Image: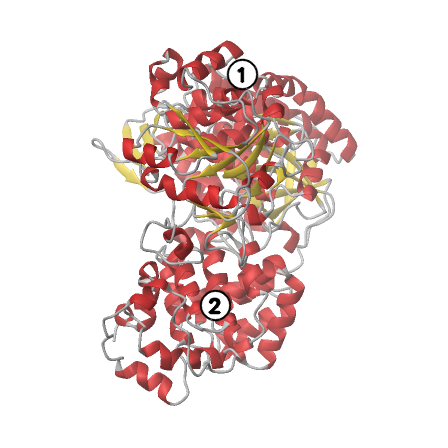
Amino acid sequence: MTNRDSLAGRVLRTGKRHLKTTLQPAARAILPTVANVAGKPAAPALPLTAPEAWAKAKQPAAAASPSLIAAVSGGGTLVPEFIADARQNIAAGNSQSVLAASYSLRDAGASHEFVHALQGMALLEISGPEMSWGQFELLGDDRIITLCPDEYFAAAFSQAPETAAKVLDRLLADNAHVEWSALALLHVAQKAFARSELDSARTLAAFGLSDAAPSHTAHIRREFERLQTWFPEGLRRQPIEVPAADATFGVLSYQQPDAWSRNVGDYIQTLASMGHLVRHANLNFVGDPQLVGFLEDIQSQVKDERRIDGPAATVAVVETHRDSSPLQDIPKNTWMLAFGWYMHHTFGQHFNFPFHPNIRPIFVSFHVNKPAMLTPEAIAYLKEHGPVGCRDWQTVALLRAAGVPAFFSGCITTTVDSVFRRDGRDERSKTAFVDAPQTGPGDILLQTQKGMREMPFAQKLETARTWINGYHTDYKNISTSRLHCFLPARSVGCEVEFKPKNRSDVRFGGLIDTSQADFDAIRTGILDKLAVVMPLITSGAAKEDVYQAWAEVCAPAMAEADAFLARVPGTVVDDDDVARLVAVAVPANGPDQDDCTDVVLDHGKASAPHLPKLLRSIMEHTAGKVRVWTLADDLTAEIRAAAEALDPRLEVVWLSAKALRDDPTVRANSSLKHRELLLALVPEILTSAKRAVFLNAATLVRGDLAKMAALPLKDRPLAARDEHRKGRQSGFGLLRSISGRHGDDHRKAMEMIAVTHAAHQFDFRVFDASVFVLDLEAARNAGLARRVTTLLLNYEMDFGEALNAVVGADRAVLPDDWNHSALIGENQDPKIVNWRDTEKPWGNGYGPFVRDWRSL
């Protein structure tokens, strides 16, 4: 029997249809056993009336598979099969179906612990470890935890590491881990290691490599073996012996327990950084013989015009890991150029930043790709060691928002030509396509090399040098999608066509479409700045003197960053523009001025036919008069008539978003959805109202919206619930994501970053703008309509994103019962149920409160 034909497979696959035929007779026999395994008494007769579809099912189910009968006839359970199948569905992108199935099973009588496990697994993918742990922490049966250790400990070590450690110790003492898959053993060992639970990590790794372990791939074995090298007694943690020297200098590498680089481009960056050391002619290097030999070799290749005759000094060099320096035995007072892409986490648990306390960093060409690494400790560290030279303008804006002194330096690979002297004629003639489509004759090159990971450090650097030497001696024309082909190849004189997948990628601000003068300015700026501080470092100058000199030489670039962050949008909406747009959207005969609860309903073409149900739920629960503002667009005359006749206490004001499309300012923005613009104008449309409740069409109202409108906002313009969706919870993460939508218009993307980042301090939690309360008077005083409309007309945002970009952290938190996600959480009596992120209640799916919506 294949997994696709398994009972678990069919249940999770048909969760959207609420198990109409899959479990009908068989579940009466099987689900009590499911309850037993989680420590619940078997129910003698399950009340199968809760799920609506189940109660109505008439067709008898096919006989259960013999393998399923065999599984439960001896007192077994299908819980392991369900959890395994849930894991497969989640991996296939069906997390919502797993949630729906969990509620189906719960309402059919399955144990709560079993349901919590399914929901914890699904929420880990949908929302992240915080909400996932909200389910997993309710588990008390180790037998259930043993079925999902990978997911359980991913959430537990992230949110409650002390609890995770205690549970893991208990499971190991009971030998529960012998039942885990090889992959689960590896992942739990990695997370335990990341949280310094080293004894547990050793136990899991040793078992994973033993003959008693479940079968595993060669990759899993290698990862177990590699993890062991990072234990305190492991090969990579051995003390670093440094000879006596005037200064110690760290050479950046990219090894760490988690992700490790096989990208030649990383080592090209390190090669470029070493040029700033070896261009000082009178330096003698000591340390690892291979690394010293490489430095001496490239020292002989420094261009004459780049060579600096400074004081003689001896410099000890050590390999320093970008992503795991705290795990190294770094010598005291080790200086290091900190550049490149920051940073890879350690098994999803934390970032190894700040660096090892013995490191003294000079930040140049620094790119923050993971804003989550900017913890309060990290921000304080960057402030202490600033100014920070940033590889791109996006990082400048991000760090400035966090209060870190930062400026645009550009990429250090622009200076790699320092160690590629040319003594003869330039006879290059070949063409190469580096990770780019081949559009003509030429060589195809791939910058990611499988063998890089196992090479010794000096050999990796030699590979990078050979790579650039090919550009220097053979290739005249390059076409590439790689930043660290484009810049270093251009540095050594190639004619380069840069063809990235997205020209608005946050890595590229200030580096793409540069003139030769701009490129030279980046290269010269880095060379000149580092030429000031490197002699101080190599001669053993005091730390304070080095950082003072760095701040002084970077001062002009800091002023340039001030100017960048003072940018304004290309189209700035003023009050006259807002008034003109409002006049177009609002009907000539305005609404009554009666005291009422104002509700703004946002609907689209798919939800429009269901508007009367939402209105009915509002009127059934809200006291007094209600005035609803919504779109007439996409509504039939029948739907409008039904809405208007629903209740004498209800007044519907029909607005037109389509009417806005003929405005010349709006017409110039072809990608703008006019419905989004109308929502932005609400504060200036509802001029007679003080508060408004915003609802999306996929909601069910079960509470009095008059009470919701009266919630205390604590002098904030609005109250909204925190965003739950994974990957959309960080405000600055969201803004960076939006900037990437601008595609070829990378200058607009940079402008958007400057405008939005300068308006906030790092970071704020994104709020859900599909249900919220707005203080209309405060919004008008703050010019909210004008500011949100400006963003909509300039950048690739929707209304909710633009509202977040304007309001940021300046909002009250809406209690969850006023915006309850339909498949998330355990609220048994919410005031508003929201299907924003799940299958809509008018579909075939199942979940709490779907039957309530359908009964309207």
SS class of the residue under badge 2? Answer: helix
The location of residue 544, given as percent across then percent down, is: 78, 32
Which of the two residues, 247 or 666, is positioned nearer the viewer here? 666
- The residue to which callout 2 is attached is 115
SS class of the residue under badge 1? Answer: loop
The amino acid type of the residue labelled 2 equals Val
- The residue to which callout 1 is attached is 568
Which of the two residues, 6 or 415, is positioned nearer the viewer here? 6
The location of residue 331, given as percent across then percent down, is: 71, 49
Residue ranking furthest to the bottom: 74
Horizontal arrangement in the rendering, residue 460 relative to residue 666 (left or right): right
Q: Cβ–Cβ below 8 Å for labels 2 and 1? A: no
Q: Residue at x 61, y 80 (%)?
A: 173
Disc 2 or 1, which lies upstream in sequence? 2
Horizontal arrangement in the rendering, residue 50 relative to residue 273 (left or right): left
The amino acid type of the residue labelled 1 equals Val
Crowding at label 1, few (<14), some or many (≥20) Cα neighbours within 10 Å? few
Crowding at label 2, few (<14), some or many (≥20) Cα neighbours within 10 Å? many
The N terminus - image quarter: bottom left
